[in-house]
Amino acid sequence: MQQMVILGATGSIGASTLSVITSNPEAYSVYALVANTNVDKMLALCLEHKPKIAHMVDGVAASELKSRLPAHLQLEVTTGEDELYDLVTKSCVDTVMAAIVGAAGLLPTLAAVKAGKRVLLANKESLVMSGRLFIDAMRESGAQVLPVDSEHNAIFQAMPEPIQQSIGVCDLDAAGISHILLTGSGGPFLTSPLESLSAMTPEQACKHPNWSMGRKISVDSASMMNKGLEYIEARWLFNTKPEQLKVVIHPQSVVHSMVQYRDGSVLAQLGNPDMRTPIAHCMSYPKRITSGVEPLDFFTVGKLSFLQPDYKRFPCLSLAIEACKQGQEATTILNAANEISVAAFLENKLKFTDIAKINEQCLSQVSMSSLETIDDIIALDTQTRRYALDLVTKI
Ligand code: NAD
Ligand code: MG
């Protein structure tokens, strides 16, 4: 029985993870659920899944949850940063699902990595911010990190086993791999007239044609910043050189990414766009379990198409690829700027097209001190957020 902690339990990935656990009750047990502020949702999850611990990052939310839980549940409610790190590093915990959204996921995810846990990584932002330090910590502790992001999970599945066993330090050349083809649907604005983009609302941006996700990643998909963050994520997970990574637009989201080999072979992973597939793969790797996802019906799918990305339509994608080439300072700045600009857009304080403008200005204006430690990264993240917030008020 694997004891699991779910960071970001009340979110979209949290829900999919709990659904896979429910389908496989003999193999997985929910040890702890972690969320930020959503007491109603957390209460419902506690009643259904009966974890030993429910952790709310927000102290007021923790008190409210405590007062609303029925006494017979025998469940401990915790709050506080240190308590969260203690929770993910407990010796009885086998597996940590890292599914907090944004930079807030960095420290708890890293704590699980340092404690040598099996870490199912959905929180791509932690790799975008701390790539090198993250991989070093993983190697040092012996933690097994498995990619939940559907594209990276597809790439992982299409890789030979020695590469799967050497995530972060793998040698693609030696394995005969020429390219990783990172696919992306292009989001809801793939074919919208360019001049209409500035008037797009948060509701339109969050209406993804194929995937149902949290609001931040949905906006990132509309701007293709999500693909940019994934480009950086792939760079670290698969130790790629820039010329080995290509982005391919694939509107149907059936091919979840591909690996191209020197001999002309291309291996792809296909499936319905449902995160329970990569989550189940990570939970049971190297075995396979039931995920609850419908089998792919090729006759319904009919046609698969592939296009070149249009960098004029998706300036955030080129910003991310450029930042990846520059290094960890640039990717940390871009990530922080993007979290602020996306949040401001979701609050109707910015136009959709201002997201890329703010991100670009932060990249060119925030000074890039060199990053040696996690504290350096957090400091640069904080400094960038301040700068971006100031830009939001001026725009
Ligand atoms: P979501 O918005 O649905 O859920 C976010 C979760 O994070 C919630 O449980 C919330 O309580 C928690 N959270 C937010 N702020 C927090 C804080 N300060 N401290 C602690 N917890 C906090 O997001 P999601 O769509 O589930 O995405 C989660 C992560 O997974 C993101 O990093 C995203 O990029 C990644 N991801 C998501 C999908 C998807 O299909 N949803 C796919 C691939 C990767
Ligand atoms: Mg993805």
Image (cartoon, rainbow, N blue to C red):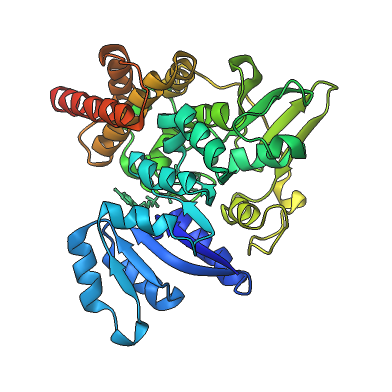
Q: How many marks?
A: 0
Q: Nearer the viewer, residue 149 or 391?
A: 149
Query: Can the viewer see residue 352?
Result: no
Q: Nearer the viewer, residue 15 or 68?
A: 68
- Is 17 situated above or below 378? below
Quarter of the image where the C terminus is located: top left
- Residue 166: x and y in percent read 66, 35
Q: Residue at coordinates 74% horizontally, 20% vertically from top-left?
A: 173
- Residue 273: x and y in percent read 60, 49
Could you tell whether 333 is left or right of 207 in the image?
A: left
- Residue 254: x and y in percent read 66, 43
Q: Nearer the viewer, residue 332 or 354?
A: 332
Q: Quadrant of residue 139?
A: top right
Q: Quadrant of residue 225?
A: top left
Q: Can you name the residue that lies furthest to the bottom here?
A: 72
Query: Can the viewer see residue 6?
Result: yes
Could you tell whether 63 is left or right of 317 in the image?
A: left
Could you tell whether 211 is left or right of 62 in the image?
A: right
Q: Residue at coordinates 63% horizontally, 54% vertically from top-left?
A: 277
- Is 311 situated above or below 236? above
Quarter of the image where the N terminus is located: bottom right
- Residue 327: x and y in percent read 44, 17
Could you tell whether 305 is left or right of 110 in the image?
A: right
